[in-house]
Image (cartoon, grey):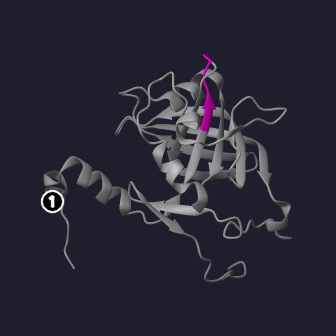
Amino acid sequence: MKCYTPSDLGQMDKFYRANFVNSLSGVKSANLVGTKGRNGIENLAIVSSVFHIGANPPLMGVLMRPHTVPRDSLQNMKETGLFTLNHVNSSIAQAAHQTSARYPEDESEFSATGLTPFYSHEFKAPYVQESHLRIGLEVQDIQKLDINQTELVIGQIVEVFVDENIVSTTGYLDIEAIDTIGVTGLDSYHKIQRIAQYEYAKA
């Protein structure tokens, strides 16, 4: 087993290093962030940095790359205060990955990839119709991390669309049943298979 040192990391090609380090945390969630700009253009971007912050109030965090180049999703979040998170499934994996391409500001990733925007009656940001788990969030806080200029967006959940048949009596969501997939590195997608479900651990 090789030990990679800071020197080894520093000598890596930029893309190689990004893929290597991005893979170290293992399988992450694959979500599409849906936003709509003040100009009316819908934006869609795949992210693998979504995480749970708290259940009461129900908060989720998304870590966005530095705003050193145009980041339409982040800009829309800041301007409108709304965004959606949409689980990626195997049938839309390729289209979801394609949203990471740099399209012109006036071109919607929905149109470019063939994915379908869906709106609820109460929420102004677009969901992905082909997603089997959709979450609507209102921005509560945005924090820039001084260490690398990434921006942490904290949103409060205001809507959740999911088939109630996958919600257990304990509130657990069987995401395997709706074909939610994960991602490693920058471009590798994985099926999720549950190996066990244990009782609440006590000492």
Q: Residue 138, image x and y in percent?
A: 70, 34
Residue lying farthest top?
Answer: 39
Q: Which residues are magenta?
A: 34-39
Type of amino acid at the residue the image marks with label 1: Asp
Quadrant location of residue 66?
Answer: top left
The residue indicated by pointer 1 is 8
Q: Which of these two is toward me, 75 or 113?
A: 113
Q: Residue 57, image x and y in percent?
A: 75, 45
**In this view, 176 is above or below 109:** below
Which quarter of the rendered picture does the C terminus lie within? bottom right
In percent of the image, x 50 and y 67: which residue is there?
190
Quadrant location of residue 200?
Answer: bottom right
Can you see residue 168? yes
Can you see residue 49? no
- 200 with respect to 75 (left or right): right
Q: Which of these two is toward me, 112 or 158?
A: 112
Q: Is residue 37 magenta?
A: yes
